[in-house]
Image: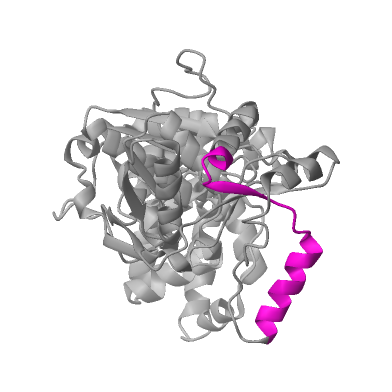
Amino acid sequence: MRTRFAFNPSKPMDILELRNLLFCYLIAKHDNGELIVSIEDSNQKEYSLENEENFYKLLDFFHIAYDEGPKKGVGSDSYVQSERLDLYKTYAEKLIKRGAAYYCFCSKEELNRKRLEATEQGLSYQYDKTHRNFPKDEALRKIRLGEKYVIRQAMPESELPISFKDKVYSDVSVPSSALDDQILIKSDGTPTYHFASALDDALYNVDLVIRNNKFLANTPKTIKLYESLGFVIPEFLHLPDIVGLNKDGGTLNDLVKQGFLPEAILNYVVHLGWNSKTNKEIYSLKELIRIFDYKFIQKRPAHFDMAKLKWFNHQYIMKMEDEKYLGFVTPYLENFYNLEGCKKEDIDSLLLAYKNKISFASEIVLLTYPIFNETISLSESMKEYLIEDESIPNTLLQFKETIKNCTNWTREDLKQIVEQLKIKCNVSDSLFYMPIRVCLTGMKNGLPFYDLLYFLGKEKILNRMEEIV
């Protein structure tokens, strides 16, 4: 099985494209096949070198190895569209000779006028084939005179449907009359996406064309191109859409920078449109290659859920060896806070205390904010909480005096003197520990209580108590 993933460097890679790449990879490798990667950069006006370079970095980050592509060429083949422009033009001319395409000289202004007229009449616009039967000699004369033109595909003029069987959406049938004479070569000489993509798949000998379901209705046009050029028609597999990405999906680069692990991202993304039919959710890439079956790809749209992605990442973080975990999160802390004067063993101990709490590496900055920031501010609700019970002011005052008199700063010493204070105050756990925590951090939850006191230190505790008590 040969599959292909084409990256368009006009925009950064996102979750949807990663899902498509992953499915192309898993389907090929499950069948001991080959994954081809190509670059769709025929539109040089929107091309971004940075996006293309980041794409290769992401391939390395996710450990997805392709078999043929820009850096793994085979023979004289190029896998970059901008290097194949003459090839697309040559095949378009072949279609013209076979009566499967034609030159069109309609101006943009003329087409816009016709489109507007159709809209005013409440009709959907379809190109009216003005130049479909235009004499070829006259067309060539116009071209020699420098007149602008495009090359359009000549779709069958009949009511007979064009049918095919999709691997996900089963039998698909579209009436020929519903298919527009699409543009193959634009007036600037570059190919349209549909033409270049279909030709690339054919020339790279792709067995299974995998793409988004938004291209499902255009597949009959692709099939007619294959037939007109004498290529073997491949099989087709259209993937469901992913909704919710615009809300909080971000780009893959954003996720990498925030400290999401490649295994976690892939493990979550594979479930966007595919179901293993088991209760298991955590898989290695090798396991996915072994079990992945395209028959379990779903038709309905998948929903991107950032909370679920964080859950997956949290599972992987918790399973990391301590040394690897520290190497993973420490740079985020060092880049945000001034740790000068802090003992490494104390920093390591603090980070390990958060190991079972963080969902992604950069979250450590937010979680440790109450520890490293010099001051904190209480929200109105927290201020109100501190006066809800008449015992709270006395508890806070007694705690401040106890800490002031503390001479040995170990967790054990802190626990001993504070537990004695709790007995003296004669209040419930919630009315003792929580008001102190709120006073010190502005929050009702966080680190284990005595870890919090130890990491804050005597000076910072007294400064914060002084501001509030």
The answer to which quarter of the image holds residue 323 is top left
Give the percent coordinates (x, y) of residue 81. Answer: 59, 32
- Residue toward you, 346 or 51: 51
| In-image side of 467 versus 267 (left or right) | right
Give the percent coordinates (x, y) of residue 40. Answer: 58, 38
| In-image side of 298 versus 346 (left or right) | left
- Residue toward you, 259 or 409: 259
At horizontal 38% and vertical 65% (from top left) the residue drawn is: 174
The answer to whether any part of residue 269 appears in the image is: yes
At horizontal 40% and vertical 26% (from top left) the residue drawn is: 66
At horizontal 51% and vertical 35% (from top left) the residue drawn is: 330
Q: Examine the structure image and report whether residue 10 is included in the region drawn in magenta.
A: no
Q: What kind of secondary structure does the magenta stretch mostly adopt?
A: helix
The answer to whether any part of residue 326 appears in the image is: no
The answer to which quarter of the image holds residue 463 is bottom right
Image quadrant holding the N terminus, namely: top left
Residue at the limit of the structure toward the right, as seen here: 145
Give the percent coordinates (x, y) of residue 170. Answer: 24, 59
Q: Vertical placement of 210 versus 423: above or below?
A: above
Q: Vertical placement of 335 versus 268: above or below?
A: above
Give the percent coordinates (x, y) of residue 161. Answer: 35, 64
Residue at the limit of the structure toward the top, as seen here: 75
User: How many numbered circles are shown?
Assistant: 0
Image quadrant holding the C terminus, namely: bottom right
- Residue toward you, 142 or 15: 142
In magenta, the rendered stretch is 95-120
